Image: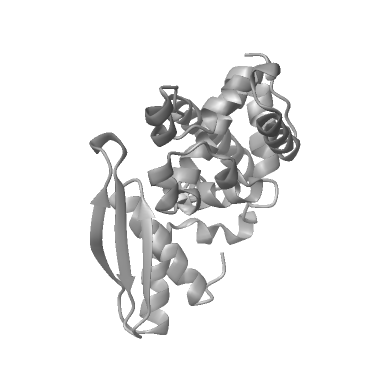
């Protein structure tokens, strides 16, 4: 779709995002679709970003897997899997999305926005994957790979510290046993949304009284995000 199809304000915002991505779309409608949440699509009868999210997830995983294979030649399969899980986690993707300002760029329905959707980790993480899928369709594997390398340039652990590639829940369990001499407790709070896109809310409780609430696209992802927040509060380094 030609750029003149969109309003001047939308074009300005899209151009600013392209500048941050360091990639200019040939077909800017792909970027618009990547930024379109299902709540907006339902209100306006347009296409949402879930198919692009599916594609972007696969593009991200193969690129991160390849880079892990190159960077950590001594690592065994289990360690490589744990590291990949950490690098493509909802929390990490939400971090990338925030660095690009994706939340403020999303086309989102009024109800979703009023409930804080622009800050919701699961939602902006999905948008990050959708943008990767859009770049892949627009520019091919080479451009998508280059973008992923730029986004992760300063986010790789050093090979000698790869022991930290354990998932957040495992690391928190070890940390709380050492620091608090107890284990964290995860309490499911709620789930909302349609069956194909449920959002789970979990509370993590530490024995010192601190609690951390997080959301995720699955109960497991919500627990991982809560564990990440707790690790940060305990000053356990990445």
- Report the label total: 0
Question: Is the residue 61 above or below the residue 141 in the image?
Answer: below
Question: Is the residue 152 above or below the residue 34 in the image?
Answer: below
Scheme by which the image is coloured: one colour
Q: Residue at x 52, y 61 (%)?
A: 164
Say left or right for 188 vs 139.
left
Q: Position of residue 131 (x, y in %)?
A: 57, 32
Q: Is residue 140 visible?
A: no
Q: Nearer the viewer, residue 225 or 116?
A: 116
Q: Is residue 120 visible?
A: yes
| Quarter of the image where one finds residue 28 | top right
Name, please, the residue furthest toward the top: 1
Q: Position of residue 46 (x, y in %)?
A: 44, 22
| Quarter of the image where one finds residue 143 | top right
Q: Quadrant of the N terminus?
A: top right
Q: Residue at x 76, y 36 (%)?
A: 19
Q: Position of residue 218 (x, y in %)?
A: 31, 47
Q: Quadrant of the C terminus?
A: bottom right
Q: Position of residue 16 (x, y in %)?
A: 73, 38
Q: Nearer the viewer, residue 63 or 117?
A: 117
Q: Residue at x 31, y 67 (%)?
A: 203
Q: Nearer the viewer, residue 141 or 8?
A: 8
Q: Residue at x 56, y 52 (%)?
A: 95
């Amino acid at each position: 779709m030609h750029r003149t199809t969109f309003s001047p304000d939308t074009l300005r915002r899209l151009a600013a995002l392209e500048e941050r991505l360091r990639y200019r779309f040939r077909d800017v409608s792909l970027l618009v679709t990547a930024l379109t949440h299902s709540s907006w699509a339902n209100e306006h009868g347009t296409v949402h970003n879930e198919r692009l999210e599916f594609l972007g997830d696969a593009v991200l995983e193969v690129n991160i897997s390849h880079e892990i294979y190159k960077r950590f030649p001594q690592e065994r399969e289990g360690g490589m899997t744990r590291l990949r899980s950490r690098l493509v986690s909802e929390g990490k993707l939400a971090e990338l999305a925030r660095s690009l300002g994706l939340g403020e760029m999303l086309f989102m329905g009024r109800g979703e926005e009023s409930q804080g959707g622009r800050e919701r980790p699961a939602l902006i993480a999905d948008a990050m994957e959708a943008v990767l899928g859009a770049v892949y369709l627009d520019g091919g594997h080479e451009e998508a790979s280059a973008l992923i390398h730029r986004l992760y340039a300063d986010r790789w652990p050093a090979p000698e510290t790869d022991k930290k590639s354990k998932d957040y829940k495992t690391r928190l369990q070890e940390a709380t046993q050492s620091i608090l001499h107890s284990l964290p407790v995860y309490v499911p709070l709620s789930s909302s949304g349609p069956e194909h896109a449920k959002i789970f809310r979990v509370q993590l409780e530490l024995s010192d009284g601190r609690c951390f609430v997080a959301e995720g696209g699955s109960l497991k992802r919500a627990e991982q995000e809560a564990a990440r927040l707790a690790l940060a509060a305990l000053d356990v380094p990445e």
